[in-house]
Amino acid sequence: MKYNNINFNKKTILITGGAGFIGSNLAFYFQKNYPESKIVVLDCFRSGETFSNGNLKSFGHFKNLLGFNGVVISGDINDKKLLKSLENNYKFDYIFHQAAISDTTAIEQDIMIKTNVNAYEDLLKIAIKHRANMIYASSAATYGDSDRFEVGFEKPNNVYGFSKVMMDNITYEYLKKDLPISIVGLKYFNVYGPKEFFKNKTASMVVQFGHQILKGLTPKLFEGSDKILRDFIYIEDIIQANIKACKPKKSGVYNVGTGNARSFEDIVNILQKELEIDNGKEYIPNPYIGSYQFFTEANIQTTKKFLDYEPRFSLEDGIKAYIPEIKRLFAEEVKW
């Protein structure tokens, strides 16, 4: 589906983090809808290297790009020589900056700030030189301990959320200038959908619960799960927001969610209905009480106003659309 009247054919598009979840979905969106566009994917791909918490440093996976016929570059956005070669060898029209260290439990503050904050400004300078509109991934993690999910009320409680606030602050500084480009930051809420599987333990609970159910296991939920609410958003609506952000009525930072918080209990109920398997539910004590967000819901009024964004997928619609891929992954990728 084409989300606006921009003709991306003949345009050169850079997608950083293009072998990851959202980046690879963007790459295939352009390949399918604008076959004459030139798509350049930059990703550092996974190497097996981990943080001190045991999680992978990079989630980029070649399987997310199977069938992609654009340019693929393996490299790190912190590599100044690489960025210089991109600046000299291409003339980008749009930059979708999805690359980041997105592990909210990582404690390596140095690499987090360098990758998420400093490299963003380096890319932004290229965007300005190329006159390429910049669309980048901010995050709902910026809200942290806030009880108001509205841009301007951020209270990050981990270094990842802090790094995204710093990205947004860079954006605000640059927007004070008279720029030849638009800059849009998108604060993603709880995204789920195809191509997230290789995020391993950081993939959404939709796919994790789905595979538990297919294994014949009883999904384990925290006690009071019916009152733990999140704004779960299907990947197609994330793509919609990115495409509409190419032609904003106003540059800025915007929330991307459904505006409708739902419970983890709802996820399990919908999955068991769609999979036609009822394994019941098991409730366990929540060990994170005191440091756990019990509610997130995007305020999307400005997103609707300035990006013409309108979420199309309810939680029921999104999970239903996702079921064939959950089953395929279970058959081909899940080891148990």
Image: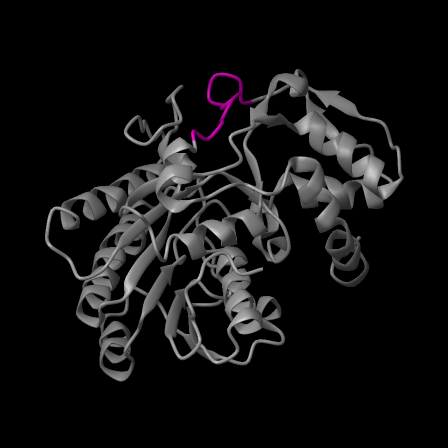
Compared to residue 158, the image places residue 175 above or below, namely below
> In which image quadrant can residue 308 be found?
top left
Quarter placement of the N terminus: bottom right
For the point 54% across and 57% down, which residue is it? Answer: 21
For the point 31% across and 70% down, which residue is it? Answer: 93
On screen, residue 304 versus residue 172, left or right, reads right
Compared to residue 81, the image places residue 29 above or below, namely above
> Which of the pair 250/46 is nearer the observer?
250
> Which of the pair 132/40 is nearer the observer?
132
Q: Position of residue 152 (x, y in %)?
A: 28, 29
Question: Farthest residue toward the left?
Answer: 177
* Numbered circles on residues, count: 0
Q: Position of residue 66 (x, y in %)?
A: 62, 74
Q: In this rendering, does residue 83 appear at all?
A: yes
Model colouring: one colour
Q: Position of residue 326 (x, y in %)?
A: 74, 52
Q: In this rendering, does residue 55 appear at all?
A: no
Compared to residue 85, the image places residue 111 above or below, namely above
- Magenta segment's dominant SS is loop
Compared to residue 316, the image places residue 224 above or below, namely above
Q: Position of residue 290 (x, y in %)?
A: 47, 16
On screen, residue 107 versus residue 297, left or right, reads left
In the image, the segment drawn in magenta is 288-299
For the point 62% across and 42% down, which residue is it? Answer: 313
Q: Is residue 323 magenta?
A: no
> In which image quadrant can residue 122 be found?
bottom left
Question: Farthest residue toward the bottom?
Answer: 89
